[in-house]
Image (cartoon, rainbow, N blue to C red):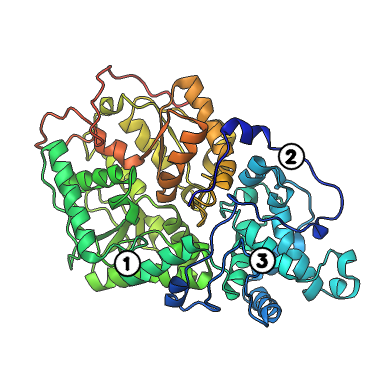
Amino acid sequence: MAEKLIKPEELAQGIKHTTPGGDWRDEKTELKRGCFNYGAQPSSTKYLGLPNVRKWQPMHDDWQLPENWKEIIIKGLADRLKRFRSLQVFMDICVRCGACADKCHFYIGSGDPKNMPVMRAELLRSIYRNDFTAAGKILGSIAGGRKLTVDVIKEWFYYFYQCTECRRCSVFCPYGIDTAEITMIGRELLNLLGLDIDWISTPAANCFRTGNHLGVQPHGFKDSVDFAVDDLEENTGVRVEAPINKKGAEVLFVVPSADYFGDPHYFGFLGYLALFHEIGLDYTLSAFASEGGNFGLFHSNEMMKRLNGKIYAEAKRLGVKWIIGAECGHMWRVLHQYMDTMNGPADFLEVPRSPITGTVFENAKTTRMVHICEFTADLIKHNKIKLDPNRNNHWKTTFHDSCNTSRAMGLLDEPRYILNKVCNHFYEMPENTIREQTFCCGSGSGIGTDENLEMRMRGGLPRANAVKYVHEKHGVNLLSCICAIDKATLPPLLEYWVPGVEVAALHELVGNALVMTGEKDRTTDLRGQEFVNNGKEGSEDV
């Protein structure tokens, strides 16, 4: 249930970037409603085989921690310091220069000093200093240490689930500290005590049970795909095929489940189907790998590894040559940052080669998986599809770089290349809010819940401000993006801060512009909105 949310003006006026006096370690954290996520359902954590399964909620005084909870945390931290060299380095090298402090969207939107990345890391670092360094063991608080208490655990829960792991702070850190990695370890330690949140645990359990986070069963998946095929035919007059579980297909196509279920994701799904039909791609969807999104990224390394493995297991079972991944942020972060060391190179597949253009995707030599934007940009570059950008004249669009595809894996130019080919009106947001410096949607990493709505609006304020700039200056009325979480969480964010701007998948715009062989006289876009024939104008990429 959503908590009551104040008006935007009141929320904005209440943000004060001031530092309270005294020692931050003496302040007890107050868990404010609207700014935290509910605890996981025991049925989900039990299904996943997680420890300390029980009923609990953050708003309760007693979190029912196991008797030996301190021992569990210290042992867990020691284990991770040993396994992850980066964690040991990040604990030791920070000089508190503050370069990261004002780069976090949650600090900007909340004014809470503990949302500065340096402070969020300090929540864990203070325990590390106290229990794992000689100076801390001898000097205690003088060396920056503090004792591990129940209040510390509650503080960890509150702030490690106010971080979207977007990694913007890491761009500005002169020492290369990646606070997202610290957040991930903090969450892993909380998970050892059974302090999971439901928005992560239940989707992860559903992925194991039915193949996707929504819990859609195979026959439901097929019904959804069939419905999309009918919808596309009604719009274009062209009947396409969307194979499922087709053995021996050349390509396995993996989508986030929201693509065949949610709005506005669904219109991008129609765009994929139209594109693959037009070029005659030999592909298949899978009823088992029917979720590209990896909710394990938000939980633990082990969960990430378990969920990522199913995509490759299905590719092997179906005997495909390689994989195309749809518009999904965390699928790509896991694939490109962690997959090779977690699941190993997918060397049972072939290095991807486009059967339409002959392009070999050298960047996918180990993952054997190509992003749909790379694939589509290559088609356009080789003039393999016919596009009419005038069909998107009713949209004045800007582009949101999704943290996981842009900052994490450098997919910066392909989406813009596509946009400039399928739209006549494309406007960039301010330079320091896009590409590597992009601002997060404020709801990634498992915290896109309604009970956390106030913090979502606070965290998304910097992104919304940049959208507001191009909305007021250029009349932008559409924010396009390539991440399923963005498509789910940006609409309420923009409705709150920038009414009048809608959200779309990039391949919805591709589907609108695509001229299909044998199509009827199309008069509407994939949403059913009338085309506006106001003539072709030059791109206004500013």
Q: Nearer the viewer, mark 1 or mark 3?
A: 3
Disc 1 on helix, strand or loop?
loop
The foreground one among 84 and 303 is 303
Q: Amino acid at mark 3?
A: Asp
Residue 199 % position (x, y): 47, 60
Label 1–label 2 contact, CB within 8 A: no
Q: Which residue is mark 1?
A: 211
94 sits to left or right of 362: right
Residue 363 is drawn in which quadrant?
bottom left
255 sits to left or right of 468: left
Give whichever of discs 1 and 3 has the lower sequence position.
Answer: 3
Residue 109 % position (x, y): 63, 41
Q: Amino acid at mark 1?
A: Gly
The foreground one among 5 and 358 is 5
The foreground one among 334 and 227 is 227
Distance CA(mark 1)–CA(mark 3): 36 Å
Query: In this view, which residue lies farthest toward the top?
Result: 534
Q: Amino acid at mark 2?
A: His
153 sits to left or right of 529: right
Q: Which residue is mark 3?
A: 61
Q: Which residue is mark 2?
A: 17
Residue drawn at 43 percent across, 28 percent down:
500
Give whichever of discs 1 and 2 has the lower sequence position.
Answer: 2
